[in-house]
Image (tube, rainbow, N blue to C red):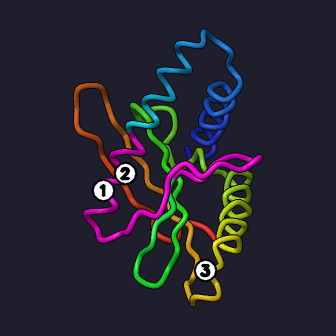
Amino acid sequence: MKKVHSFFCTIWNLFSRFWDGKARKFHAKDKFGEKGENRATQFLKLRGYQILTRNVRFSKGEIDIVAKNENSIVFIEVKTRHSAEYCHPIEAVDKKKQKKIKQMGLRYYREKKYAGQGFAIRFDIVTLIWPDGEEPVIEHFVDAFR
């Protein structure tokens, strides 16, 4: 069953990534993603994370949230979906995406000179499954990849 699910998840991710429908649909998708990032930020703050910055842009992409938690600088990828019917949001953070996030995170970490301050580095994922008209189900995957 897992292989079938992974196949459909891969197709779904490719479809959503390369479909060039009307701009307003992408605009709505961007707004939904922003709404998810806002809720994830609230979620993390309630758990003691200090949000350092959001939406750090690089030529390869962006880091959704950079936070401090205890003695770690945490780079957080946020994935928001209306449902997990076709694919759980965490499955959208594949090895290729993880590699990009790690490269961007390490660059940010070096540029801000956190290593010299004794901070560790960590990569988390926060997923939100947020059906219309309902509250989201939020999952936090601590140290999701290395």
* Magenta residues (range): 36-64
Q: Are marks 1 and 2 in contact (CB under 8 Å)?
A: yes
Please name the amino acid that badge 2 sits on.
Ala
State whether residue 39 is above or below residue 76. above
Which of labels 2 and 3 is toward the front?
3
Residue highlighted by disc 3: 114
The magenta stretch spans residue 44:
yes
CA gap between label 1 and label 2 equals: 5 Å
Res 95 quadrant in image: bottom right
Whether residue 27 is situated above or below residue 106 in the rendered picture: above
N-term mark: 1 or 3? 1
Label 1 Cα crowd, 10 Å radius (few <14 / some 14-19 / many 20+): some
Are the residues at dot 2 and dot 3 in contact (C-beta closer than 8 Å)?
A: no
Amino acid on which disc 1 is placed: Phe
73 on left or right of 59 = left
Identify residue type, mark 3: Tyr
The residue carrying mark 2 is 40
Q: Residue at x 60, y 80 (%)?
A: 114
**On the image, which quarter does residue 119 sit in?**
bottom right
> Which one is earlier in the sequence, the residue at label 2 or at label 3?
2
Q: Residues within 10 Å of mark 3 (few under 14, many from 20)?
A: some
